[in-house]
Each structure stands twice: as structure tokens, then as C-alpha cells.
Image (spheres, rainbow, N blue to C red):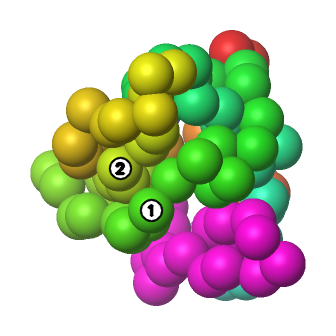
Amino acid sequence: MSFHHTARNWRIHHDNGETLFRVELRDVQGNWHERTVRLDDHIGNTDGWFIWGGNGFTRTARNVRLEDTEWGPKLVAVLESNGGGDRGDQGMLLGDKIKNEDGHLRFTGP
């Protein structure tokens, strides 16, 4: 199950050329914990498209933001393509690969 069902106050923060995802997660006792993960450790850019299992997407991105959807937060950005242009806004649902394990963010793989 996507983490967003047991999360609140998600947002991104840019720090030293990287994108951090911050969120409050509920544990099994109902307590809330603020957690932060560096998205650049898990998401890359392949020819203008986001890719799970990559890294460093922020280096080739602009207008990085979160959009709220009924499926949870969606990471959106304009990513450079190999030819030097871009493909316009690209997005990926963070809940596709991130889950809440008792108040901790866990990636489910590439």
C-alpha cells in the first residue's frame, strides 16, 4: 500500500543541489514522526524521463515540485534530454515505490 494513506504534510526541500522529500508518517501506535529522504539517491533522469533506481535527477531538472493527486504526491519537473532540450513536465507518483513501515519511509526497489 502506498505510504500516503498514513502520511500528512508532505513537501520537498532543495538543499545543496539535491531534492529532499519530507513527510510526517503514522506508526502502528498512531504516533506521528517526521521523516526525510534524499530523492536523488533513488531517482534519476534518463533522456528526459524520471527513472526509479537511478540517482541525481536534480542536476538536470528545473521547476521541481510536488502535485497532490488522489494517488498521493506526484513529483513533477522538467528534465533535460540527451539532445540538450527537454520533454516538458514529467511526473512520477512517489507512492509507486515508497511505503510506510511503522513510521519509516522504505523504497520498494527500482
Residue 78's mark? 2
The residue positioned 35% from the left and 50% from the top of the image is: 78
The residue positioned 15% from the left and 51% from the top of the image is: 70
Please, is residue 80 above or below residue 63 in the view? above
- Which image quarter: residue 88? top left
Which one is earlier in the sequence, the residue at label 2 or at label 1? 1
Left or right of 57 in this view: 72: left
Q: Residues within 10 Å of mark 1 (few under 14, many from 20)?
A: some
Task: Please tell me whether mark 2 sits on a helix, a strand or a loop.
Answer: strand
Please, is residue 44 above or below residue 105 in the view? above
Decide: marks 2, 1 in contact (CB < 8 A)? Answer: yes
- Which image quarter: residue 43? top right
Figure disc tally = 2
Residue that badge 1 annotates: 62
Task: Please tell me whether mark 1 sits on a helix, a strand or a loop.
Answer: strand
Left or right of 57 in this view: 8: left
Task: Measuring from the top left, give residue 41's x and y in whole percent.
Answer: 83, 43
Please, is residue 80 above or below residue 60 in the view? above
* Badge 1 amino acid: Arg
Left or right of 100 in this view: 18: right
* Badge 2 amino acid: Val
The residue positioned 75% from the left and 65% from the top of the image is: 18
* Residue 100 visible, this angle: no
Distance in Å between CA atoms under marks 2 and 1: 5 Å
The residue positioned 76% from the left and 44% from the top of the image is: 56
Task: Tell me where the magenta segment starts and ends, as one range.
Answer: 3-21
